[in-house]
C-alpha cells in the first residue's frame, strides 16, 4: 500500500505513471520516486523530496558514465541518481493545474519537457549536475501524450494540433482537425490515434504533413492512449476499454490496412 508505506496522498488522477524497469529495479514516480527490487519487491530507495502531482513515467539515461532518471512532476523536473535515488538537481517548472503527464525526452545532455493548459515547453541542459534552460516556448503544449523524437525533430500534439518542431523549438508544420490524440513513430511513419478514434498513418517528414491513410476504428469515450506497434500490427484502445487491432503486414506504406 504505497499511501500507507510512504505516507503519500494520491494526486487528483491517482498514481497513474507507468512503472519503469531499469536493470534489477522497478521505479515508480509518485511525487517522490521509489525503487523496488524487481525479484523480491523490497524497497531499494526512495527520494527525500515530494515534487508534487506525478503522472509522468521517468526517463532513464546515461551521461558521463552515470545512470540518471529524469522525472517530471507537478512542481517541475527532477534529476535523480539511478543507483541510490539521491537528487542531482531540480528545475521548478510547475503549471497551474499541476498536470504534466509526458515523459521527458533526453537528447544527449539536453532534456525536453512540455505541458498543456497553455503552459508550453522548454529545453534544458544538464551540465556538471546542474539544469540550465536552453530555450522556452509556447510552440508545443503536450496535454496528454508526449512528443516523439525522430531524426532531430519532435512530433506531437500541441493541445489539439498535431505539430512538428525542430530541437530549437521552431515550428515546421501543423495539422488541425485531429483533436487531442497520441502517436508512435516507426520506420519513418507516424501512427496516430486521433481524438475521434481514427488511426491515421502519415510520413515522419519535417517539411510537410503527408497523410498516407486513415480509418475509423473506435467510438465512444476518449482516445488518449498511445497506439502500440508490434510485428506489423497496431493496437489501440479507448477510455471505455474498447480495443482494436489493425494489421499492416500486407499493406504498402500503410495505405490499405486491414482491420
Image (cartoon, rainbow, N blue to C red):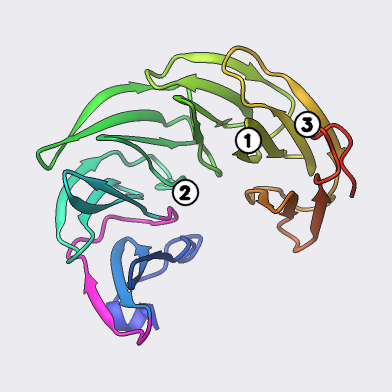
What residue did someone put label 1 on?
A: 187
Q: Is residue 257 left or right of residue 122?
A: right
Q: Earlier in the sequence, mark 1 or mark 3?
A: 1
- Location of residue 1 with respect to 78 vertically, above or below: below
**Callout in the foreground (1, 2):** 1
Q: Is residue 145 left or right of residue 49?
A: right
Residue located at (70% from left, 53% from top): 231
What residue did someone put label 2 on?
A: 101
Report x, y in % for residue 197: 79, 44
- Magenta-tinted stretch: 39-57
Q: Is residue 55 magenta?
A: yes
Task: Name the secondary structure under disc 3.
Answer: loop
> Tag 2: Cα neighbours inside 10 Å, few (<14), some, or many (≥20)?
many
Assign the magenta stretch its main secondary structure: loop
Residue located at (54% from left, 13% from top): 172
Q: Nearer the viewer, residue 120 or 21?
A: 21
What residue did someone put label 3 on?
A: 253
Amino acid at each position: 500500500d504505497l499511501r500507507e508505506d510512504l505516507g503519500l496522498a494520491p494526486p487528483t488522477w491517482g498514481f497513474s505513471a507507468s512503472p519503469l524497469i531499469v536493470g534489477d529495479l522497478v521505479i515508480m514516480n509518485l511525487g517522490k520516486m521509489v525503487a523496488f527490487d524487481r525479484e523480491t519487491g523490497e524497497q531499494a530507495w526512495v527520494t527525500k523530496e515530494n515534487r508534487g502531482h506525478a503522472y509522468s513515467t521517468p526517463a532513464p539515461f546515461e551521461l558521463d558514465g552515470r545512470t540518471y532518471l529524469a522525472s517530471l512532476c507537478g512542481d517541475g523536473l527532477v534529476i535523480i541518481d539511478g543507483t541510490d535515488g539521491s537528487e542531482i538537481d531540480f528545475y521548478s517548472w510547475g503549471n497551474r493545474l499541476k498536470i504534466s503527464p509526458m515523459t521527458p525526452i533526453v537528447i544527449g545532455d539536453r532534456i525536453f519537457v512540455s505541458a498543456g493548459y497553455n503552459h508550453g515547453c522548454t529545453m534544458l541542459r544538464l551540465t556538471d549536475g546542474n539544469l540550465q534552460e536552453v530555450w522556452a516556448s509556447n510552440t508545443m503544449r503536450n496535454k496528454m501524450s508526449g512528443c516523439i523524437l525522430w531524426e532531430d525533430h519532435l512530433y506531437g500534439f500541441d493541445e489539439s494540433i498535431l505539430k512538428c518542431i525542430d530541437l530549437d523549438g521552431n515550428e515546421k508544420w501543423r495539422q488541425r482537425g485531429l483533436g487531442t490524440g497520441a502517436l508512435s513513430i516507426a520506420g519513418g511513419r507516424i501512427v496516430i490515434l486521433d481524438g475521434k478514434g481514427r488511426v491515421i498513418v502519415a510520413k515522419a517528414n519535417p517539411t510537410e504533413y503527408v497523410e498516407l491513410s486513415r480509418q475509423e476504428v473506435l467510438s465512444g469515450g476518449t482516445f488518449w492512449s498511445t497506439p502500440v506497434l508490434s510485428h506489423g500490427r497496431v493496437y489501440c484502445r479507448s477510455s471505455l476499454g474498447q480495443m482494436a487491432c489493425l494489421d499492416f503486414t500486407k499493406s504498402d506504406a500503410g495505405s490499405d490496412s486491414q482491420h
